[in-house]
Image (spheres, helix red, strand yellow):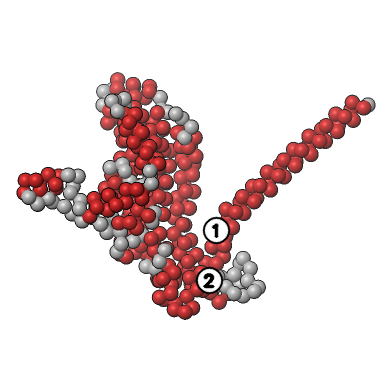
């Protein structure tokens, strides 16, 4: 009888510990969810709030008179469509160029062995570690006097005047590095492609070689059809990187006609003051959140679409050596 009571007490204790663990885990997850969602919910609430309601004591999360005027005004004041077109143009073109250059580089590092391959891979990893600011001045001088990768200087030896071009304040300062595999975060993307290609079985290549495929055909016809997850992941990360970038883009692009949306976010305060004058604080607060929501909305949609590929790529390439 005593043994039965002890067994029953142990079972009750085990059940109690289990539910305490579940409750503690739920408490932690709710706390983390609140920390992550609170800023977004605050932005949505303020973006829909008329400026006159900001200092109303009874104002709650849901505005008393929700309005989309803040979105309309912010799009008009900050030339939303012009700068959105710049952001889309830069993000899409640079992403496509990075997909080509980084996938080819990653495939070469994963499948071919040559003298210095380890050194090349090490130097590629250094591009992830070394901050961009260390190369800011040399890059600025290179783009200011771009000599077509030394060809213009070589012609100058003969003609006495080198052929150079000033690429500052143009989108070419972003396109050229992306096409050469040294764009924003290209080292990371090359690493992801290399790890993914290394995880693919050699039998696929052997079968292609039997059919007479050369190295490029192996990459084009056999490897690419099996790399949708890593391509989707790199495309997602690249679009986000170029869409959100202000450091590299702001370093070389200065004219308002070529600036991206994220570059204009830093000027929202001055623009709002020039539009609204002394009453600018209210305008800044609500229209800042409105324009930020418009900026992050495409990224959220892209991530929702590519989430499955992102998880699969991280699972297949992130843990392999």
* View extreme (left): residue: 159
Q: What residue is drawn where x is 42% and y is 63%?
A: 265
Q: What residue is drawn where x is 37% and y is 55%?
A: 247
Find numbered disc 2 in the image and state the secondary structure of the residue it sits on.
loop
Q: Which mark is residue 98?
A: none
Q: What residue is drawn where x is 57% and y is 62%?
A: 42
Q: Is residue 1 above or below residue 137?
A: above
**Label 1 to label 2, Cα distance in Å?**
17 Å
- Answer whether residue 88 is visible to the viewer in this image: no
Q: Are marks 1 and 2 in contact (CB under 8 Å)?
A: no
Q: Which residue is mark 2?
A: 67
Q: What residue is drawn where x is 12% and y is 44%?
A: 154
- The answer to which of 152 and 63 lies nearer the viewer is 152
**Residue 187: x percent and y percent?**
37, 40
**Residue 107: x percent and y percent?**
34, 32
Q: Is residue 79 above or below residue 93?
A: below
Disc 1: CA contacts within 10 A as few (<14), some (14-19) or many (>=20): few
Q: How many marks?
A: 2
Please state, as top left, top right, bottom left or bottom right, where the C terminus lies in the image. top left
Please state, as top left, top right, bottom left or bottom right, where the N terminus lies in the image. top right
Disc 2: CA contacts within 10 A as few (<14), some (14-19) or many (>=20): few
Mark 1 or mark 2, which has the lower sequence index?
1
Q: Which mark is residue 40?
A: 1
- Answer whether residue 120 is visible to the viewer in this image: yes
**Residue 273: x percent and y percent?**
43, 74
Quadrant for residue 210, please give it. Answer: top left
**Residue 174: x percent and y percent?**
30, 51
């Amino acid at each position: 009888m005593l043994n039965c009571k002890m067994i029953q007490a142990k079972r009750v204790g085990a059940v109690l510990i289990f539910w305490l663990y579940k409750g503690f885990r739920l408490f932690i997850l709710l706390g983390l969810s609140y920390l992550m969602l609170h800023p977004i919910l605050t932005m949505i609430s303020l973006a829909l709030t008329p400026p006159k309601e900001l200092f109303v004591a009874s104002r709650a999360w849901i505005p008393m008179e929700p309005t989309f005027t803040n979105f309309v005004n912010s799009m008009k004041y900050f030339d939303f469509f012009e700068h959105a077109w710049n952001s889309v143009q830069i993000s899409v073109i640079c992403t496509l160029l990075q997909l080509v250059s980084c996938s080819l580089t990653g495939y070469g590092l994963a499948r071919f062995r040559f003298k210095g391959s380890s050194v090349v891979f090490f130097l590629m990893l250094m591009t992830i570690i070394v901050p961009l600011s260390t190369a800011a001045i040399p890059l600025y001088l290179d783009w200011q006097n771009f000599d077509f990768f030394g060809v213009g200087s070589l012609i100058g030896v003969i003609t006495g005047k080198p052929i150079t071009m000033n690429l500052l304040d143009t989108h070419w300062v972003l396109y050229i590095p992306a096409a050469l595999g040294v764009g924003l975060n290209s080292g990371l993307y090359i690493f992801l492609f290399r790890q993914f290609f290394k995880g693919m079985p050699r039998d696929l290549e052997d079968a292609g070689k039997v059919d007479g495929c050369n190295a490029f055909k192996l990459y084009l016809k056999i490897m690419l059809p099996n790399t949708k997850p890593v391509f989707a992941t790199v495309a997602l990360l690249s679009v986000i990187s170029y869409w959100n970038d202000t450091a590299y883009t702001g370093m070389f692009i200065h004219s308002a006609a070529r600036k991206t949306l994220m570059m204009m976010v830093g000027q929202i305060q001055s623009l709002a003051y020039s539009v609204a004058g002394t009453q600018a604080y209210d305008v800044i607060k609500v229209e800042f959140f409105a324009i930020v929501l418009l900026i992050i909305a495409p990224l959220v949609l892209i991530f929702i679409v590519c989430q499955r590929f992102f998880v699969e790529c991280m699972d297949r390439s992130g843990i392999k050596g």
